[in-house]
Image (cartoon, rainbow, N blue to C red):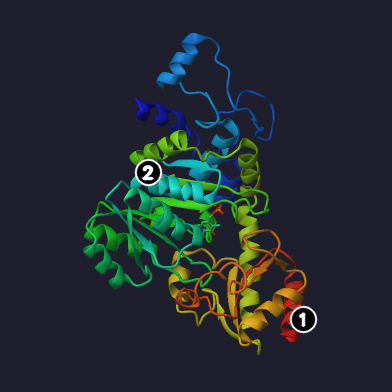
Amino acid sequence: MEDSKSKDFINNHHDKFYLNYGFATRSLHAGEHVGQPETSAHTGAIYQSSTFVFKNSDEGAQLFAGEKSGYIYTRLGNPSVRLLEAKINALEGAELKKKNPDLRISTIAFSSGMAAISSTLMAILSNGDTLILADVVYGATEHLASNVLSKFGINTVEVDTSNISALEKVIKENPKAKAILFETPTNPSLVVSDIKKVSETVKAVNPNIRVIVDNTFATPYLQRPLELGADVVVHSTTKYICGHGTVVGGLMTTFHDEIKNAVYMMIKDVGGNPSPFDSWLVNLGLKTLPLRMEKHCSNAMELAKYLSDHSKVAKVHYPGLKNSPYFELASKQMKHFGGMISIELKGGFEAGKKLMDNIEIFTLAVSLGCVDSLIQHPASMTHACVPKEKRLKAGLTDGLVRISVGLEDLEDLITALDKGLSIV
Ligand SMILES: *Cc1c(COP(=O)(O)O)cnc(C)c1O
C-alpha cells in the first residue's frame, strides 16, 4: 500500500521528458507547467502551503489510498517541489531514457544535501550491513557514517575509490556491504575517481551493492553518474545547482523504483522535505546552470594556469591542467573540469592566513558554487579541529587554499590574486 501511494505521487514526473532537447533547453523548460494547477502564470508559483484541500470525503479517501494523484500535505509532496524534481529527472535522465524508454527516473528533493545523503543511506542500509565509504568525503558525510549510522548497527569501511585494485580488495573482504558512496572530484584535493570503472568493479564482485555518487562538485551539466553505471546520484543544491548562495538544499535521483520508494518512506516518516520557496529558488537557479557552469569552468581553467606559474604557489590542484594525474580521466568523464581549484602556498599556514586577510574581491567564506568567488583556508578554518595527521592524509596541507571560482571578469580575479599573493 505504501508503495503504490509513493509511486503514484512521484512517478508522474515523466509526463514531459524533452528527450530530444539539449541540456540548456531542458534546464529552462522541463517540469514547467507540469502538474501545476491551471493558471496562466508563466513562472511556476510558490505554493507556500502546508496542506491541500480535498473536494469531498471521497477524494480525500482516494488520495490517501493512492488511487488518485494529487497533493495532501507538503511533507508528502508540493507542486513547487515537484517542479524542481521533474526538472532534475529531465537533466539527469534524458540520455538514459533515450536508450531505455521504460526506465523510470525519480528525483526526491530535500531540505539539505545532508538530508538527501542521510535519507538515501538509511533507505538502502539496515542493521548489520556495511557501507563502503570513500576515504575523502564531505566532513558531515563521514561524521554521519561514524557517529550516526554506527548507532544503528551500520558498519563503515573506507577505501580510496581512485585506486581500483584497493577497491576490489575491499569489496571482496566485505560481503555484507550494501552500498558504496564516493565523490568525484573530491573536496578539496580534487581527486577524480572513474565512475564507470568503480561501478563495474563493484558490480562484478557483488551485484547487491548500490553505487551512490555525490555529484555536488560536478553538477549534472558536467557529469552524469547514472549514465556511467551508478545507481543513485545525490547533490547538495546549496552549491552550483542553486548557485546564488540563497538556499541549503539537496537531491536524490535514481532509476530503481525500490530505492525511490524506500527514500520516499524516509522523507515521509523522517522528514527532510524542502520548503516550497527554497525549491522555487533552486528551480530558478537551474535555469542558468549551463551558462554559469561554462563561465565557472573557463574562469577556473585560466586561473589554474595563471597560478601554476606563480612563484608563491607550490602546487595547483585542478583536473584541467595537462600535468594533473586526473587530466585524461576527467576529460573523458566530465564535460569541463569544474569551477573549484585548490592551491598549496609555499609559505604554509601563515601564508594561507595572510592571503585570507588581504585578498580583494574573493569572499572569505565556506561553501562553494556561488556566482561570486569564494576563498577559504581549511587548515585555519573548516579543518582546524581535524588532527594534523588526518588532515595531511586527506591532502589538506597547512598552506592549502580552496578557491570556488565565480563569474567575475577574469582580469579582476587575476589582479586580486596577484595583489594578495604579493603580500604573503
Ligand atoms: C556541501 C556538501 C554536502 C552537504 O550539503 P548541505 O547542503 O550543506 O547539507 C555534501 N557533499 C558535498 C560534496 C558538499 O559540498
Q: Find residue 419 and name its label.
A: 1
- Residue 116 percent location from the top left of the image: 48, 47
Q: Quadrant of ligand 1?
A: bottom right
* Quadrant, the C terminus: bottom right
| Circles 1 and 2 in contact, beta carbons < 8 Å | no
Q: Is residue 102 visible?
A: no
- Image coordinates of residue 154 in percent, x first then y, are 32, 52
State which mark lies toward you, 1 or 2: 2
Residue 100 position in % (x across, y down): 36, 44
Is residue 38 rendered to the left or right of residue 253? right
Could you tell me which secondary element the residue under label 1 belongs to? helix
At 37% from the left and 41% from the top, the residue drawn is: 103
For mark 2, does the 10 Å Cα neighbourhood hold few (<14), some (14 to 19), or many (20 or more) residues? some
Residue 277, quarter of the rendered image? top right
Q: Does residue 111 appear to the left or right of 132 in the view shown?
A: right
Which secondary structure lies at badge 2? helix
Does the Cβ of the disc 2 residue fall within 8 Å of ligand 1?
no
Q: Name the kind of residue labelled 2 in the image.
A: Ala
What residue is pinned by disc 2?
Answer: 123
Amino acid at the residue labelled 1: Lys
Which numbered disc, 1 or 2, marks the residue that appears first in the sequence? 2
CA separation, marks 1 and 2? 50 Å
Q: Residue at x 52, y 67 (%)?
A: 187
Residues 139 and 339: in front is 139
Residue 241, can we see it? Answer: yes
Using the rendered view, name the quadrant where residue 83 is placed.
Answer: top right
